[in-house]
Image: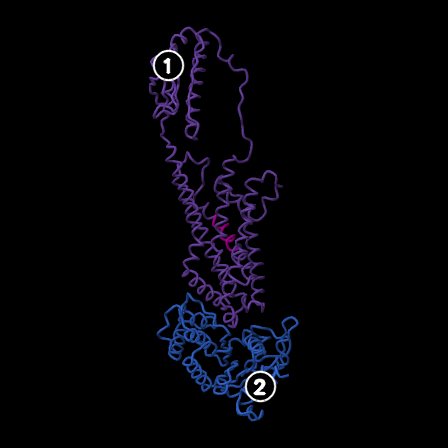
Chain colours: A blue, B purple
Amino acid sequence: MISVENISKSYGDVQAVKGMTFQAQDAQITTLLGANGSGKTTTLRSISGLLKQDGGAVKVDGIDVKQDTIAAQRRLGVFPDSFGLYTRLTTREHMEYFAELHGLHGSALDAAVSEVSERLNLEDILDRRTEGFSQGQRMKVALSRAIMHKPQNIVLDEPTRGLDVMNIRLLRHILQELKDAGHCVLLSSHVMAEVEILSDHVVMMADGVVCAEGSPLELISKSGQPNLEEAFVVLTGQKDHQERNVA
Amino acid sequence: MIAQALAVYKKEMRDMLRDRRMLIAAFSFALLGPAFMGFIAFLTKEDDPVEVKITAAVSYMEQAPGLVAFMEREGLVVSPYTGDKVGEALPEGADALVMLPSTYAEDLKSGNPVSVQVFTDESSRKGLERGRTIMGLVEGYNSYLTVHRMTARGIPTSLLTSVVPSRHDISEKHLAVQLLGDGLAMMFILATFVGGLSVAVDTLAGERERHSMQPLLAQPVTSMAVILGKLGMVSSFSIIGTVLMVTTTMTTMSFIPAEMLPLSIYIDASTITLLLMQLIPFAIFIAACQLFISIQVKSFKEGQSYISMFMFVPMFVAYLKIYGSAKLPPVANYFPVMTDMESISSLLFTGEFAATNFFISVAISVVGALVLTWFTSRKLQSEVLLDAA
């Protein structure tokens, strides 16, 4: 379980996150839904131990990320906002490298590679260097290295960005499997349809604060709007271009 | 932490060894530099063979059997010249033309001074040197005759010499030894810089540019383990480059004829061991410097610019030592790079172990590498590294 308690983070004069509080439960898919610049990536980076928040606390399975970053990171699988692959390494070498950083060796490492490659259908690209991979193949490699060590908590920053329909469906299927296996899945997105289908719990963000949270149906109901997109506009107080022009 | 550092090291080595450009950049200097030196030596050798015979063409040589015998005894080949005048060029195959007068034998017999003209072609170094040799022999024959004439008349030949000058070099090292020794030491030191240059930029600035820093830093691995793994990789390239440079240089020098080298080189197991004991810590120190620079920049290109500028430091210091050491205070010999050059040069060309320079060099390398690695690992924790330029 991931618990974010009143965190704030500034970059110089810009306050990216202002008192964010929410929880992502085990066996649930929780989505941070927000426009560009709403603080999603900053929040996820604070959870991943990549950033130190100015105030508040982030806990992963009860471990304070700021106090004991390494212990928290052991319980996390991170899929960052850019794939960041090594083009001269093969898929297998990516998996082995990240598994070794988590302390896997020998037969345990080999078993993990087999299991993950089977789960993500990586057999055909397992021993190919990642240079020239399609977006979908890159996504698979990035996801494989995030789940190699079977983390209880998986954090994904806009994982469907740049993917085609089939790869989005594949990713959705994998995330559902992880959820069904009892993992805590936390992702960020600004694609309403994807969020509506996938999420058990949605945290709506705007300007670095939580505006509303609940299941997609609860949020739609709460806003009195016909769908999640309209609910988002109302609940986050966003104005679209037309409204701004009229104003 | 050690297992994680080893995992990083293994991945980095695998990654870099697959990049052909990196390998060319890392090792071309070590392989081609000494090979180029050897090629130049080879060309020089062809141009000036050791067993060369200098040839002099002599007119009216039948009148000068004494002069001819004197020249031949000194190793010259003497051939007759039948012309009366000197042409626009020297006779074919001759390095100089010695024109004797038609009255040579008669003038010599009567004790009159004989005008002997030596024509040379000084448009090339070879022509200049050989022409001067022939001229020197003609002058030597003049002294030889004078001594014999005076001896025949009962005059002591010591009267010919009032002052006997002799020159003695009191400098610690001969200039040629100093220049060659420092030059070679500079090559070895530059090899430590060149070996790790590209990979140092790629492993941090490149990683940041490729956005692969984020997934790496999100793993449960300390920044020190990451930096140690990367330092190991850069040091390996630097050490391999340096060992290659030492090996190829020594191999090349073994092919250069001894008479072409103004000094002896002391190569044995203990010299090589001491050399590596100094160069390996130095290579690690330079790798730490390069990583320290690499982590400050946002892109591979920016990193290349700064690390290339860093290359000027050893070159500047080395040239300062080679050409300006006389004007530097003695303590300058213990500065970084200078103390390394002094120690290496002394070891290879005098066979002496310069203990003070050696230990200062190793101490600077070890302390420098530790301090810079600590700073680099601290910098790796900085949030600004998460995003590229």
Tally of marks:
2
| Rendered image quadrant of residue B13 | bottom left
Q: Is residue B152 found left or right of B214 in the rendered image?
A: left
Residue located 49% across and 50% down the image:
B279
| Place of residue B67 in the rendered image (x, y in percent of width and height, measured from the top left) | 38, 16
The residue where tag 2 is placed is: A233
Task: Label 1, secondary structure: give it.
Answer: helix
The residue where tag 1 is placed is: B66
| Rendered image quadrant of residue A235 | bottom right
| Chain ID, mark 2 | A
The amino acid pointed to by label 1 is: Gly
| Chain ID, mark 1 | B
Task: Label 2, secondary structure: give it.
Answer: helix
Q: Are marks 1 and 2 on the same chain?
A: no
Magenta stretch bounds: B274-284
Image quarter where the C terminus of chain B lies is bottom right
Q: Is residue B111 above or below residue B3?
A: above
Of B76 and B121, nearer the camera is B121
Of B227 and B130, nearer the camera is B130
Residue located 35% across and 17% down the image:
B83
